Image: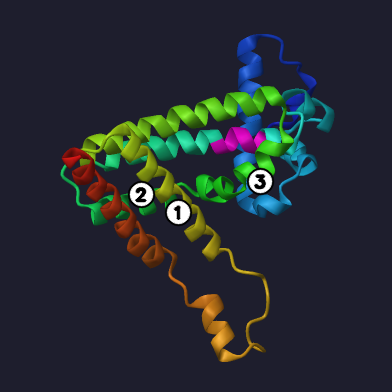
Amino acid sequence: MFVADNGKDFQRARSKDQKRERRQDILSAARAHLADVGFEGFSMGPLAKAAGLARATLYLYFPSREEVLLELYLESARAWTSAIERSASPGMSPADFLDVFYDVSFETPLFLELAPRLAATIEVNVSPESLIAGKRMNAELAQRLVVHTSLIFSLSLEQSAAMFTGLFALLIGSIQIMTRPNVDLDPLPEDVREMMTGLDSKALFLTNGVLLMKGSQASVGSSSQS
C-alpha cells in the first residue's frame, strides 16, 4: 500500500507548485487505496493516513471521496482515450477494432472500476463546479474518439458518435456482467450456477459490437444513396 511521508502534514503547502505536488501525492495514495479496497471500501480516513495527512488537511484538497474518485476517473479516461487512439488505425476490420476497444479497457483498471459508477454515484455527489469541469472533459475525450473512429471507418461524425455511444454502453454492460455477487455458489442448482458464471463478457461484447458496427456502416451506404 502506498504511504506518503507523514512529515508532509506538518509542512503547509504554500506555493502553487507545492499545492500541486500535495494534490498529486493524494491522488497517488488514492490510486493505491482504491486498488487495495475497491470502490465500496474507498474512504477518506484511510486515504488521509495513506497520504500522510490529517483528515482535515485532506478535505482542503478534496471535499469528498467522490471528488477524489472523479479526478481518478478523468485521469483514467484520458489514458484510455490515448491508448485507443494509439492502437486503432485506418484499415482495421470491425473485429480488430472491437478487440482493441475491449482489451485497452481491461488494461486500464481504474477506468473499469469507475466508469460504471460515474453517472449514478460519483457525479451526483460532487460540487457543481467539479461536475461541469468533469462533463466538459468527458465531452472533449469522447469527441476525440468520435473523430478518430470516423476516420478509421469513413463515417460521418454523427454516425461515428452514434456508434461510439453504443459501443461504450455495451462495454459498461459487459463490465457489469463480470461483477458477480459475493455468494456461495455450491448450494445453488447447477442451472443457476451456470447462469451466474457462464457468461463471457468479451464474447458478448465482440458479438454484439460487430452487429452494432455493421449497422453503423450500413447506414453510410443508405445515407449516401438518399
Q: Between residues 168 and 9, which one lies in front from this camera angle?
A: 168
Figure check: 34 above or below 181: above
Residue appearing at x 56%, y 38% in the figure: 73
Residue that label 2 marks: 101
Residue 1 at least partly seen = no
Q: Secondary structure at mark 3?
A: helix
Separation of marks 1 and 3 at Cα, in angstroms: 16 Å
Which residue lies most toward the top here? Answer: 15
In the rendered image, which residue does mark 3 sit on? 120
- Foreground residue, 20 or 169? 169
For label 1, the crowd category at 10 Å Cα-Cα, with few meaning under 14, some 14 to 19 and many 20 or more, is many
- The percent coordinates of residue 223 (x first, y second) are 23, 40
Q: Nearer the viewer, residue 109 or 132?
A: 132
Disc 3 marks a residue whose amino acid type is Ala
Q: Which of disc 1 and disc 2 is earlier in sequence?
A: 2
**Residue at the image position 31 percent from the left and 55 percent from the top:** 99
Please name the residue that numbered disc 1 is placed on.
171
At mark 2, the secondary structure is helix
Q: Which amino acid lies under the numbered mark 1 shown in the image of this protein?
A: Leu
